[in-house]
Amino acid sequence: MNKTLLVVLLSLILCVQYSYSFMFEVRAADEKCIVEELRQDTLVNGKFEVSDRLSKNIAFQYEVVMASMQMKFYVRGPTGDLILVNHDASTGVIAFNAQEAGDYSFCFLDNYRPGAQAMPLSRTVSLEIKTGVEANDYSDVITKGQLKPSEIELKKIEDVVDSIKVEILYMKNREETMRNTNESTNSRVANLSIFCFFVLIGSAAFQINYLKRYFKQRKLI
């Protein structure tokens, strides 16, 4: 029974550990974004690093090349508002709380510095994003010795269970919203169909009446 419970708990932990790692190249004067869908009040943290490794076809010295480039990093919320921005980033940390549900964009734009010579460059970016329970930091509790290691693991499991409850409630509310939207749309479509039907009937009746009067005036009937 204990083994079964342990397996279930580990499965729950794996289900809610939202940690993503990306590695991609950003060309000069080009922009690349990673988009993550987050629910409201989701804790987000992470880090990024702009590698000094350049594309293989570049033979310039690193110091010379880097002096001509500046990597802009920013995070945009669902409404397009800037949450984080770093205009000249080589490394950095990400930490914020999602104020509203929706798509959040983590973007990198590598621009030439003013007066720099344009060259066909590309730099590698590594990005790590953690959300939800995975974003919680237990290091402070461990350092202060407030909890034993076993108690910390239990605390993590408790946070996982709470996160699952919130996730289920979020999905339930989202499903209910979508169902209400579908029902409202179906009702509007039905009403529109009925309206179009009566418009067609009225139009047909008007045309028949008009033709009758026209033929009577012409003494054709």
Image (tube, rainbow, N blue to C red):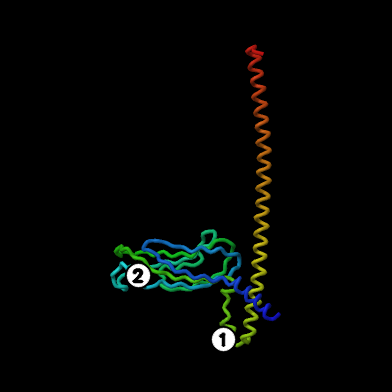
- Residue, disc 2: 54
Residue type pointed to by label 2: Leu
Q: Count neighbours of disc 2 (C-alpha within 10 A) and say few if under 14, some if 14 to 19, many if 20 or more.
A: some
Up-down: is 14 above or below 190?
below
Would you name the residue on which mark 1 appears?
Answer: 143
Find the distance from the CA under tag 2 to the CA under tag 1: 39 Å
- Quadrant (top left/top right/bottom left/bottom right) for the N terminus: bottom right
Name the residue located 46 percent from the left edge and 72 percent from the top edge.
Answer: 48
Pick the residue in front: 87 or 139: 139
Residue at the extreme top of the image, as rendered:
219
**197 above or below 106?**
above
**Left or right: 115 as drawn, with respect to 155:** left
Name the residue at 31% across, 70% down: 65
Element marked by disc 1 = helix
Q: Residue at x 44, y 62 (%)?
A: 32
Q: Residue at x 36, y 66 (%)?
A: 122
The part of the image, by quadrant, that contains residue 177 is: bottom right
Image quadrant assignment for residue 102: bottom right
Mark 2 or 1 closer to N-term?
A: 2
Residue farthest along the right direction in this orientation: 1
Total count of labels: 2
- Residue 183: percent from left, percent from top: 68, 50
Image quarter where the C terminus lies is: top right
Return the x and y of residue 199 as percentages of the image width and height.
Answer: 66, 33
Q: Position of residue 207 (x, y in %)?
A: 64, 24
Taking depth in this image into account, of 6 and 109 the one nearest to the observer is: 6
Q: Residue type at mark 1?
A: Thr
Whole-percent x, y for residue 21 in the image: 49, 70
Q: Are marks 2 and 1 in contact (CB under 8 Å)?
A: no
Q: Residues within 10 Å of mark 1 (few under 14, many from 20)?
A: few
Q: Nearer the viewer, mark 2 or mark 1?
A: 2
Q: Which mark identifies residue 24?
A: none
